[in-house]
Image: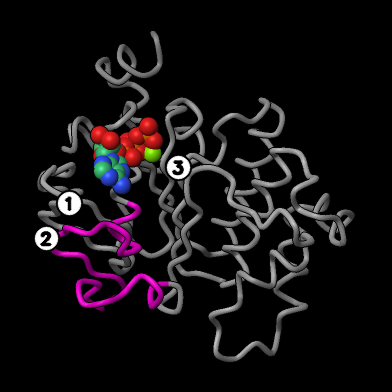
């Protein structure tokens, strides 16, 4: 692991909905500049970790810190301004708005918006197809293009940490590849990424480090190379 500063620090995190506890004592860190993935089966609690960071889970105890700030006292609407952008599961675009309008909404919470055209240009460099379709209604885009809008909207915040929840779910292999190339570029540009994926092979391909979540507990962690070689990971998730 690099020696860069701790960006996201989760320790002893318990979280749940109503009476039901879903996460049991999660310890997870993302250092500044890292690309980390969380892998695991259906209902393991992957999305709940991201939602806990974004303060979208009602019952949370434990340590949740970002760039030295305690997230515990924050409301969900305060999170983007801290530098955390969350692309949730499913492609949530505003169907009746254009690509451009969707992207602008991503920067809506910014107090100062002097460089919106430059930010949008950065998104278009990453996803050239969105530039071509900037005036098109988002609801008429393909699934892959809608996912590009969802990711682009998050990037309009120029976040320090990007939370991605199954961004390649349901997309054609070629689009998935495009998407993952984009994540590599985003990471190279300096954004830290926490990626949730059910496609374990893909996740370990793009991320440098990973956590394996099983029934709300971290079962394994290591570099992507280590996890790729791990017999349990290979048997359970890579079908080898
Ligand atoms: N809003 C909610 N209210 C009650 N229970 C919920 C809620 N959201 C999730 N859960 C439950 O929490 C558990 C973990 O869900 P979560 O969405 O975090 O899993 P996941 O690992 O992201 O799964 P998937 O791979 O299917 O997306 C599941 O058993 C789910 O039913
Ligand atoms: Mg999920």
20 sits left or right of 121 in the view: left
Q: Residues within 10 Å of mark 1 (few under 14, many from 20)?
A: many
Q: CA distance from mark 2 to mark 1?
A: 6 Å
Local secondary structure at mark 1: strand
Front-most of residues 66 and 189: 66
Local secondary structure at mark 2: strand
Name the residue that disc number 3 marks.
Answer: 207
Q: Residues within 10 Å of mark 3 (few under 14, many from 20)?
A: many
Tell me if label 2 and label 1 are in contact, CB under 8 Å. yes
Residue 197 seen: yes
**Residue 76 part of the magenta-drawn span:** yes
Q: Earlier in the sequence, mark 2 or mark 1?
A: 1
Name the residue that disc number 2 marks.
Answer: 61
128 sits left or right of 77 in the view: right
What segment is highlighted magenta in the picture? 50-79
Residue 47 placement: quadrant: top left
Label 1 beta carbon less than 8 Å to ligand 1: no
| Rendered position, 18 above or below 235 | below
Q: Earlier in the sequence, mark 3 or mark 1?
A: 1
How far across and how far down the image is residue 128, in percent?
Answer: 82, 53
């Amino acid at each position: 692991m690099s020696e860069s500063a701790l960006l996201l620090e989760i320790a002893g995190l318990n979280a749940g909905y109503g009476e039901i506890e879903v996460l049991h004592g999660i310890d997870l860190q993302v250092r500044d500049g890292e690309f980390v993935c969380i892998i695991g089966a259906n209902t393991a609690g992957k999305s709940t970790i991201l939602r806990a960071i974004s303060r979208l889970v009602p019952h949370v105890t434990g340590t949740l810190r970002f760039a030295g700030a305690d997230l515990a006292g924050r409301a969900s609407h305060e999170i983007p301004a801290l530098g955390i952008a969350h692309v949730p599961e499913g492609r949530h675009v505003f169907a009746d708005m254009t690509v451009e309008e969707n992207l602008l909404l991503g920067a809506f919470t910014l107090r100062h918006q002097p460089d919106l055209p430059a930010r949008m240009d950065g998104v278009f460099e990453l996803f050239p197809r969105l530039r071509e379709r900037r005036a098109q209604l988002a609801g008429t885009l393909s699934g892959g293009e809608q996912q590009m809008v969802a990711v682009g909207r998050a990037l309009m915040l120029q976040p320090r940490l990007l939370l991605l929840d199954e961004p390649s779910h349901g997309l054609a292999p070629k689009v998935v590849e495009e998407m993952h190339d984009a994540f590599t570029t985003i990471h190279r540009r300096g954004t830290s990424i926490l990626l949730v994926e059910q496609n374990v092979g893909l996740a370990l391909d793009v991320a440098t480090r990973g956590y394996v979540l099983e029934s709300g507990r971290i079962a394994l962690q290591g570099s992507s190379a280590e996890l790729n070689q791990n017999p349990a990971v290979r048997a359970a998730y890579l079908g080898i």
